[in-house]
Amino acid sequence: MLPLLTREAVRAIDQDAIERLGVPGVTLMEHAGRGAFEQIRARLPGRLDAVLVVCGPGQNGGDGFVVARHLAWSGFRPRVALGCDAERVQGDARIQLERLRAIGIEPARVRSWAELHALGEGATLVVDALFGTGLTRALEGSYAELVATMNALGALGVPTVALDLPSGVDADSGAVLGVAPGVALTLTFAALKRGLYQHPGAGLAGEVVCVPIGVPGPSSASTGLLEPGDVARWLPRRAGDVHKGDAGRVLIVAGSPGHTGAALLAGLGAQRGGAGLVTLAPRAEARAALDAKVVELMTMALPSEPTLAAAELVALGADCDALVVGPGLGTDPDGQALARSLALALQRPTVLDADVLGAHAGRLDALRNAAAPRVLTPHPGEAARLLGWTVARVQADRYAAAGELAAQSGAVCVLKGAGSLVAAPDGRMAVCARGTPALASGGTGDVLAGLIGALLASLPAFEAAAAGVYLHALAGELAAQSDRGLLAREVADRLPAALERCRTA
């Protein structure tokens, strides 16, 4: 996984370079600005004639001064806007400002939308160097007006390149602090930032490119961005003599009257995910309807009384490699009673999804007493109910929500949605940047639950969940014909192709 850093971790890299390696801060700034200029020149060569560089008072503004100087040295005539009085620019950024002035470029002090818009007339490219990772409060006043101007120029077809991250995007969470520009390209320095991989920040950042600044970046971090190679490493090719008994036995407790499709889709996810034998155990009154739909899948009969059904499933589950509990199981009292019993008692690694999660709202810590590893797969609404938060709070900082779910439950948690997160109780976190809006379709979560169940038959919980999330997102991309209209079973059918794509990437 590629390391994803918080603002504090970024500061630690800079501090280590300055204190331990003896690299002056102004040199790091020079490397960052020159690297950004080189990326801009390579990627947008036809946009350099009239570049508008919008600078703030801090380190990010200093990076912008360096970009402007290198543009001038290359024969271009950049315009530089300064969003504060020049006296506020201090430290390393001040040194870079004086270097810019020394070659005859004096930044124009801009205070309003109108002033920046006038300066930007005829611009071919905007460089956003207002604020970087250090911003922690909402942009307002004249700074908000400058961001609005960048967006207005963007609407006229003038692209923006952000240095480090779009100004106003929180480096840790991806939340927008007041306002933020939508950019075509983000040139982030030294290492990737967490906020670039959660919405709304992810949707504003455009293409993200990491620019080296001449010091060692992190080789690992507690939070990482999933890559195809991770999946390929966790799921090596099988031996030629493998048989279905070796490939994993998965029991899926799912399905109630009117909701047998959820059980079927979970079963398809498990099969396409590689399980050798998959058995569906629906509630007794739903078995006949489910039997009429299955082909390769097996079904089993359960007693209608929840206590007896739970006891039988615990016994049968002991002979399986992994279980999935919850899709379409029901929110009526009997369904919830069965869900609560199974969540703790099953002796094998288990995915807890959908209706079983509702049975644990307000009692998440009870899952610490589970008899074997658990993987929770809530969408934001379910996560909010489990934590006693609002959905808005969950979505405002998905990293915090996923971490809290894992910490309270002692289980691996998959917080679904754009930029799905996988969090472990030990603090590890994986982020999936793949996917498509077409996955916003009923039943795709059931496929994911079954897929993770199949992988849980042979992998530790964190790796099974992370591989499942990535394969599911990639399968959605491969199956989608547009940004909508995707059927959940089509996602399941593309899972083997997604795995091969990871192995050949």
Image (tube, rainbow, N blue to C red):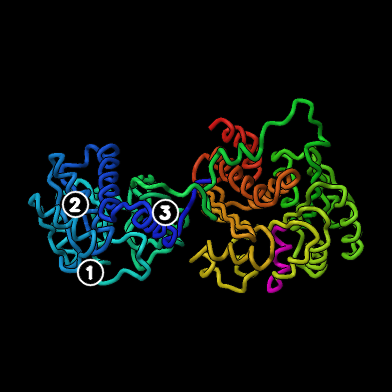
**Left or right: where does residue 185 sit relative to residue 323?**
left
Measured in 3D between alpha carbons, the distance from the residue under mark 3 to the one under mark 1, in whole angstroms, is: 24 Å
Horizontal and vertical percent position of residue 115: 14, 63
Q: Kindly identify the amino acid type of the residue bearing the numbered disc 2.
A: Leu
Task: From this view, report whether residue 234 is shown above or below residue 314.
Answer: above
Please give the name of the residue rendered at 18% of the width and 61% of the height, measured from the top-left corner: 82
Residue 127 seen by the camera: yes
Q: Residue at x 65, y 40 (%)?
A: 234
The residues tagged by marks 2 and 3 sit, at their Cα atoms, a distance apart of 23 Å
Marked residue nearer the N-terminal end (2 or 3):
2
Give the residue pinned by disc 2: 52
User: Helix or strand or loop: what does disc 3 sit on?
Assistant: helix
Q: Is residue 396 above or below residue 291?
A: below
Residue position marked by numbered label 1 in the rendering = 142
Q: Which residue position holds label 3? A: 203
Q: Amino acid at mark 1?
A: Ser
Q: Which picture quadrant has residue 153?
A: bottom left
Front-lying residue, 364 or 145 = 364
Q: Quadrant of residue 302?
A: bottom right
Task: Say which quarter of the image contains residue 350.
Answer: bottom right
Disc 3 marks a residue whose amino acid type is Gly
The front one of 7 and 355 is: 7
**Residue at disc 1, secondary structure:** helix
Label 1 environment density (alpha carbons within 10 Å; few <14, some 14–19, many ≥20): some
How far apart marks 1 and 2 lie (CA) works out to 17 Å
Magenta residues? 352-363
- Visible residue check, residue 160: no
Q: Earlier in the sequence, mark 3 or mark 1?
A: 1
